[in-house]
Amino acid sequence: MPRFNDYRHKKTKSQTHFSWIGLAKMVPAMLLLSLCLSGCRGQNPSAQISDVGFYFDTVVELRLNGTEDQSLIDKCFEKMGQYEALLSRTREGSDVWRINHSAGEPVEVSDDTAALITLAEKYYELSDGAFDITVAPYVAIWDFTDNPGKVPAAASIAAARIHVGFPLLHLDGNTVTLDDPRASIDLGGIAKGYIADRLKEYLVGEGVTSGFINLGGNMLTIGTKPGDVSWNIGIRRPFGEASDVITTVKVNGLSVVTSGPYERYFEKDGKIYHHILDPKNGYPVWNGLASVTILSDSSADGDALSTSCFVLGLDRGMELIESLDGIEALFITDDMQLHYSSGFPISD
Ligand code: AMP
Ligand code: MG
């Protein structure tokens, strides 16, 4: 069973050490698997290939059933590298970096970046501002990827407030303009879902009918497992061990994306500070939720909605989910109660 969020768990408390160690431990296992597969050549459709990599500051894993064509996986990793070079906030020369360093001047961006900004605007509106990619000044101040436990000064967060707000951002075709030279964007709440969708599109176009794309716990399935068996995705107990699955969900071809504070946080003086920020005040959101999992066809939708709903809280988040066709959600409150949307395929 693919374990949803397994790898993210390794990143939680000791993110800075990430998990090159974990990756190193996994590589021999993957090599063993490929050796076995090379011994099994010609046994399609029972063939299976898989591989792990490190992109978007997290471990990614691909598994394809019914093929032995390693070039499909290699191409996916190549694409991930290209998306990272395009969408990273911190990588010099990326589209996002150029937007954030444009000093108020218009910037030409790729079709992918323009599509992501368009999608981000849709979720900004749908979530009534809870999902807002212009939280980047706050993200930079908190720096959860590299922060060993320093709570920023309240004054610096307050000073950033006037540089945050989606209306500061304009997209006209492929031209992006930020009205405020100190405004900036961060696509961390939506990019992995979008990239997973593009990878699936590519793989399906190449004839892949079964597999999954796991981008740091953002899980996008392709078809069913061999033998028409549903994928059984484990949903982690918030703040539990990696192997501690609170429930599972059976899906065929759907995306399963979870947002939660335990994915990136630090603890200081007994208090947890985590990476999902309230655009209104720049502080981590605490509203009684411990995680939100979204089931959807599109992983970009799932990614944006899991972050949106986490910020909105149980009542407003559930209301949003119930208003959308083809989207289901599981909200876990901090008392570890499970709250399902009306069409969620609850496990027996
Ligand atoms: P996710 O893990 O998909 O919930 O995304 C969380 C990431 O999105 C954070 O690490 C930030 O990079 C970014 N982010 C934080 N708060 C927000 C927000 N309110 N709206 C949009 N993106 C956010
Ligand atoms: Mg998200």
Image (cartoon, rainbow, N blue to C red):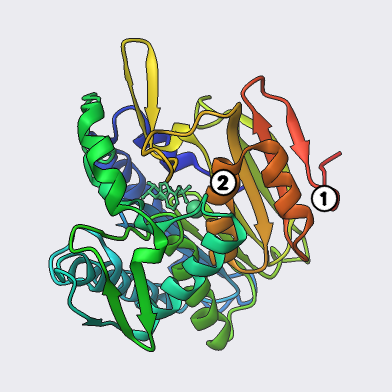
Q: Nearer the viewer, residue 64 or 68?
A: 64
Residue 345 got which mark?
A: 1
Query: Residue 307 at what x, y percent from top left?
Result: 52, 49
In the rendered image, the vertical position of residue 316 relative to residue 271, given as above or below: below
**The image quarter in which residue 264 lies:** top left
> In the rendered view, does 231 fall on the left or right side of 236?
right
**Residue 237 place in picture, x, y as percent:** 60, 29
Which amino acid does the dot numbered 2 rest on?
Thr
Residue 88 lies in what quarter of the image?
bottom left
Frontmost residue, 343 versus 165: 165
Residue 341 vs 261, above or below: the answer is: below
How many neighbours does mark 2 have within 10 angstroms: few (below 14), some (14-19), or many (20 or more)?
A: many
The vertical placement of 46 against 150, above or below, is below
User: Which residue: 36% across, 31% down?
Assistant: 265
Marks 1/2: CA distance?
A: 16 Å
Q: Residue at x 33, y 58 (%)?
A: 186
Can the viewer see residue 36? no
Q: Position of residue 225 (x, y in %)?
A: 69, 63
Find disc 2 in the rendering and name its residue: 258
Give the mark nearest the N terminus, 1 or 2: 2
